[in-house]
Image (spheres, rainbow, N blue to C red):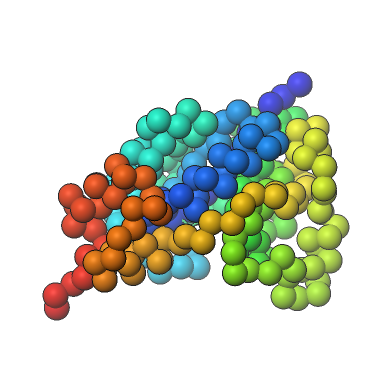
Amino acid sequence: MHRLQALFGGTFDPVHYGHLKPVEILANQIGLQCVTIMPNNVPPHRPQPDASSTQRKHMLELAIADKPLFRLDERELRRDSPSYTAQTLQEWRVEQGPETPLAFIIGQDSLLTFPSWHQYHTILENSHLIVCRRPGYPLTMREEQHQQWLEQHLTYQSEDLHSLPAGKIYLAETPWFDISATLIRQRLQQGLPCDEMLPTAVLRYIQQQGLYQKSDN
Ligand code: ATP
């Protein structure tokens, strides 16, 4: 039997506990051995990150240094073109073969915008979707057709994620972490503490690099 592989994409500008903790808890809940973090390069529908690709990668390396659950995949960072999840998952499927169960992990906010992602339908052809809870976002889709799409693919059985190669959406019962990279950037610009929100090594690196500081001009 092939082991479930999970991918966790994002901008990670910077990586924080709202990324790491739900996924660690999820891994325990459903029996995930390894989660591949894949920072993206130029997110197609978002403004450019404040930190460079190298800085975001370095912050991730610091964040997962003592966490064997996670590994880092730099393929999207190395691309010059936009990072499209659909394309990445297609490549990953080819690499892993047709039978390996694959899952893409997202937060609740990303589920709401998911139908606007490039070729979102093809994502479920290649992988499952695992949704972690995030405070402040509803668990129902804004449009009826997208709600139907969600319900068609929904499973309440985490075993499905292991026994099927792709196609299911699983709403994980992970705790809420009210943290976002936006909030951290804003707090740092205002000189407010963020110690509880991200690993100390990452915070130190941010300070060393002078990242997310208030600009004087
Ligand atoms: P920003 O505030 O800059 O938009 P972010 O904190 O949402 O960033 P991203 O790198 O955009 O972080 O998110 C990567 C993935 O992690 C997304 O799927 C997002 O939904 C999820 N995520 C981020 N923060 C949380 C959180 N606090 N709880 C659950 N999921 C989260």
Residue drawn at point x = 46 percent, y = 61 percent: 180
Q: Which residue is at the front of the view, 21 or 3? A: 21
162, above or below 212, in the image: above
> Which corner quadrant of the image does residue 114 belong to?
bottom right
Q: Which residue is at the front of the view, 170 or 124? A: 170
Q: Which quarter shows the N terminus?
A: top right
39, above or below 101, in the image: below
Q: Which quarter shows the C terminus?
A: bottom left
Residue drawn at point x = 25 percent, y = 52 percent: 206
> Which corner quadrant of the image does residue 58 belong to?
top left
**Rendering coords of residue 95 (x, y %):** 60, 31
| Residue 40 makes an appearance in the image | no
Q: Which residue is at the front of the view, 164 or 27? A: 27
> Which residue reaches farthest top?
1
Residue drawn at point x = 46 percent, y = 49 percent: 17
**Rendering coords of residue 4 (x, y %):** 68, 32
